[in-house]
């Protein structure tokens, strides 16, 4: 899943930090943080593992795979953040976004400079909140295309999303409750004392 889902499926502020930190640390360093942050790192990994093998994700990837092949999972992640954002009440999404930015700003010492620049843009343009809009998700799709080494930067991924929105939303609705239930179980079983 992408930024919104990982932050939304965090049960503490420390887990939010760990969920974001996961993509910026070496595997060998994952246990070198305070327990609550380690929980977030492990939760991020568990979410990714669960997501990768879920049948609804497998079906959703088929929407994008003819165009982007192995990158289809990244585009499903972005699309699912759109559906998650639109499943939340406007005020709840705004409060969640503000909380995440504040938590991350308060823990900037744990992140590399590349994250500092990213967070500045994320907060300035309020990515988490604007995932609910077509333009916000279009921007995110362009970011994924820009980072992908072997994809044409002008691929019509956003158009594929728009043309298959109902199908993707169907997969999201069947998947996300399973993910939430799994994350709650994982969190309850693997709390670090």
Image (cartoon, helix red, strand yellow):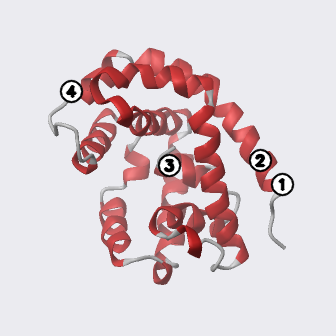
Q: Residue at x 25, y 42 (%)?
A: 145
Per the model, the C-alpha gap separating discs 3 and 1 is: 21 Å
Q: Is residue 58 above or below residue 76?
A: above
* Mark 3 or 1, nearer chain start: 3
Q: Is residue 6 above or below residue 166?
A: below
Q: Position of residue 116 (x, y in %)?
A: 36, 74
Could you say which is closer to the camera, residue 26 or residue 145?
Answer: 26
Q: Are marks 2 and 4 in contact (CB under 8 Å)?
A: no
Could you say which is closer to the camera, residue 133 or residue 144?
Answer: 144
Per the model, the C-alpha gap separating discs 3 and 4 is: 23 Å
Per the model, the C-alpha gap separating discs 4 and 1 is: 41 Å
> In this rendering, would 51 be left or right of 123?
right
Instruction: Identify the residue under disc 3.
Output: 4
- Give SS at disc 4: loop
* Mark 4 or 1, nearer chain start: 4
> In this rendering, would 29 be left or right of 158?
right
Instruction: Identify the residue under disc 4.
Output: 156
Could you say which is closer to the camera, residue 103 or residue 66?
Answer: 66
Instruction: Identify the residue under disc 1.
Output: 188
* Mark 3 or 4, nearer chain start: 3
- Give SS at disc 2: helix
Q: Are marks 2 and 3 in contact (CB under 8 Å)?
A: no
> In this rendering, would 185 be left or right of 46?
right
Per the model, the C-alpha gap separating discs 2 and 1 is: 6 Å
């Amino acid at each position: 899943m992408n930024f919104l889902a990982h932050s939304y499926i965090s049960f503490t502020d420390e887990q939010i930090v760990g969920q974001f930190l996961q993509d910026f640390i070496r595997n060998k360093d994952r246990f070198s943080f305070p327990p609550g942050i380690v929980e977030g790192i492990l939760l991020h990994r568990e979410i990714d593992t669960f997501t990768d093998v879920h049948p609804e994700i497998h079906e959703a990837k088929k929407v994008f795979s003819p165009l982007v092949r192995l990158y289809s999972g990244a585009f499903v992640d972005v699309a699912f953040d759109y559906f998650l954002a639109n499943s939340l009440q406007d005020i709840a999404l705004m409060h969640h976004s503000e909380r995440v930015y504040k938590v991350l700003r308060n823990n900037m010492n744990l992140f590399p400079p590349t994250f500092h620049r990213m967070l500045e843009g994320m907060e300035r343009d309020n990515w988490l909140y604007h995932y609910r809009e077509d333009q916000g998700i279009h921007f995110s799709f362009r970011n994924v295309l820009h980072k992908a080494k072997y994809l044409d930067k002008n691929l019509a991924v956003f158009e594929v999303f728009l043309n298959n929105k109902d199908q993707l939303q169907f997969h999201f609705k069947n998947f996300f409750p399973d993910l939430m239930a799994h994350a709650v179980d994982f969190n309850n079983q693997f709390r670090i004392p």
